[in-house]
Amino acid sequence: MHPVKNILIRLPNWLGDMVMATPLVKAIGLQYPDATIDVIAKKGIDFLLDSFPPHQHTYSFDKAAYPGLAGAWKFGKEISKQKKYDLLFCMPDSLSSAVMARATNAKNRIGFSKEMRQLLLTDAYKKPRGKHRVEEYMCLLEKYTKQKLNTPPVELKVTAPLPPQFTAPYWVININSEASSRRLPAAKAVSIIQKIRTITQDTILLIGSPKESDFVNEVYAQLENKTNIISIAGKTSIAELTGLLSHAEIMLTTDSGPAHVSYALGTPTLVLFGAGNEKNTGPFNKNNSCVIRLGKLACEPCMNNVCKIYGIPECLLQLDENKIAESALQLLKNKN
């Protein structure tokens, strides 16, 4: 077998998935300690690479500049002109990512078999069922090397200082999610925040992206006790948010990308699950995280982005505020 000199990793496109890719990146480095590792990352979340396991070069992929399959092919071809790769690990399971992989002319292209991707990959493997997303990714390396490997923890290095406009200690609360079935209903968000206000005197920061700021501010306006509660929704970049999370006492959050960033940074993280399966996409590190699910409805867990039965996600609406508060305090106790 020829020595492996250059490895390229096509990272996932979503923030949470990219965080859950860190164990595979680290494991590849351990498996091939003499190889150069480069990565392809989606523009907009590539800032996370400053906190990633060791790698060398980054190719930042802008989907707007390289649209569709033709764009993916063009981007891959541009990479092929810059460097020759012995191995390429393609973590997304989309057709476009496999097209990009093929265009790089990497000698061995490893990824999941789906959507005829096996025609573009040299080593295509069926995605395992019943596994955590981290374990799915690790499967690519295990299948290729024919070895059972130890899975490293999900870990991001703390590189960002605390932004000067904030003072510790503070809690971070995220009530948002891309899918309405994972987003806290406004009334429930108000109730939970008010309960948290009764158990800590620390500042509470409500976060959210610019497009989520209206919802967060709507919830904030309904709070009876706003003492030391600040909405910063839409006022921080994802990179700045990473710095905030790394210095937070604790994060209370829905199932979302920031949840994975939080526990990967070592911050105690309490995740409220509605739709989605925590066995697949919940926090992978158990030492500093906790998941709360209602677990009483016949429809749980579902994978729908919109609650098709109740309209408003009843699985989140029925969560017990007291249980949430107790779990948060227990996480803090474990931290200290």
Image: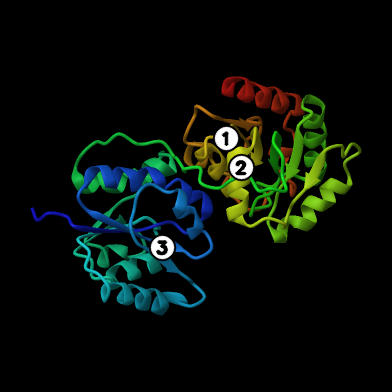
Colouring style: rainbow
Q: Quadrant of residue 275?
A: top right
Q: Secondary structure at mark 2?
A: helix
Residue 245 disc label:
2
Specify whether residue 186 is in view: yes
Q: Secondary structure at mark 1?
A: loop
* Position in image of residue 116 (x %, y %): 32, 65
Q: Is 237 displayed left or right of 312 in the figure?
A: left
Choose the circle earlier in sequence order: 2 or 3: 3
CA–CA distance between discs 1 and 2?
7 Å
Per the image, the residue denoted by label 1 is 267
Q: Nearer the viewer, mark 1 or mark 3?
A: 1
- Residue at 37 percent across and 75 percent down: it is 75
- Front residue of this view, candidates 246 and 211: 246
Identify the amino acid type marked 3.
Answer: Ser
Specify whether residue 128 is in view: no
CA–CA distance between discs 2 and 3?
30 Å
Q: Secondary structure at mark 3?
A: loop
Identify the amino acid type marked 1.
Answer: Thr
